[in-house]
Amino acid sequence: TRKIIIDTDPGQDDAVAILLALASPELEVLGLTTVAGNVPLDLTHRNARIICEIAGRKDIPVHAGCDRPMCRPLVTAEYVHGKSGIDGIEIFEPETALGEAHAVDFIIETLRGQEPGDVTLVPIGPLTNIATAFERAPEIIPRVREIVLMGGAYFEVGNVTPAAEFNIYVDPEAAKLVFSSGVPLSVLPLDVTHRALTNREWVETMRSTGPVGRAVAGWTDFFERYDRSKYGSEGAPLHDPCAIAYLIRPDLFQGRHINVEIETAGEFTQGMTVADWWRVTGRKPNAMFLRDIDRDGFFDLLTERIGSL
Ligand code: BDR
Ligand code: CA
């Protein structure tokens, strides 16, 4: 099994990603660390605990982290995710207490406590917590096995600006730090996730599997509205579950090991992931940049795993 920390800002698609991880015996979830992103921090850590309780996993530690990006004001996305961040289900107050440690300290201490090369970080929100941990305790950087993140876009360009994807746009300075850290990186950009669209049949199958499946159907029903009105597409893009699926079934994805730089200064392109797909720069590759997904294989995996919870 692979030990992971999921750094998250739930988010309906974050919720499905967390459920997929909890349902997968290949992964050991050491904890969830939460960050401000889709909604403010006090909602993301509450939502993370709600999601664990829906999965029947009150034992998973949840730690709250940074409440704003490293050097910019926070930008949120209630227009996509609703006021709660996880609209689409009946929201309740979680019984589980929030972990005492700050998420950044939890990340640092976990990496110090585990064998070097044992822990994989899976950020599915802005990269503030991860970058802050690397800045504060650089000696943990070589101990990280890999970072598998959802963020960025290249051929599919942006969803929050014409050039940038939300997670990178919100905290580009943090993203820059992570992309230049030297840790092996795998990136699931919009190029992949916009091909991971739900369809009616899958949503109804999920709904019929039980209470967890009903929550997933409620979330994707809500989430779909935005994409339908914005892009005219049927179905909700399951961005963040792609990162978890990549850990379990890398064979479902295709990409290239290339150089990816983060734009932090551009007048129109802040947060852009400048991906040297055609290897024209001679800059050193620093990321496995995924570009395609076996959609059917991905949704079969989700049905099999989450359906069993
Ligand atoms: C990313 O931004 C958030 O809205 C989603 O949860 C996902 O992590 C997609 O751009
Ligand atoms: Ca997210």
Image: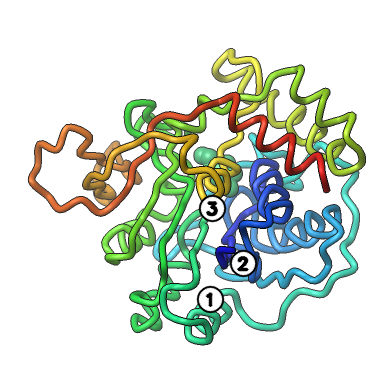
- Residue 129: x %, y % from top left: 50, 68
| CB contact under 8 Å: marks 1 and 2 | yes
- Residue 56: x %, y % from top left: 87, 59
Q: Residues within 10 Å of mark 2 (few under 14, many from 20)?
A: many
Q: Can you tell which of label 3 and label 1 is closer to the viewer?
A: 1
Q: Which three-letter amino acid code belongs to the residue tagged 2? A: Thr
- Residue 61: x %, y % from top left: 72, 72
CA gap, disc 3 to disc 2?
10 Å
Q: Residues within 10 Å of mark 1 (few under 14, many from 20)?
A: many
Cβ of mark 3 under 8 A from ligand 2? yes
Q: Which three-letter amino acid code belongs to the residue tagged 1? A: Ile
Q: Which residue is mark 3?
A: 125
Disc 2 secondary structure class: strand
Ligand 1's quadrant = top right
Q: Which residue is mark 2?
A: 33
- Residue depicted at 43% across the width and 59% down the height: 147
Q: Which residue is mark 1?
A: 107
Cβ of mark 1 under 8 A from ligand 2? no
Number of numbered tags placed on the structure image: 3
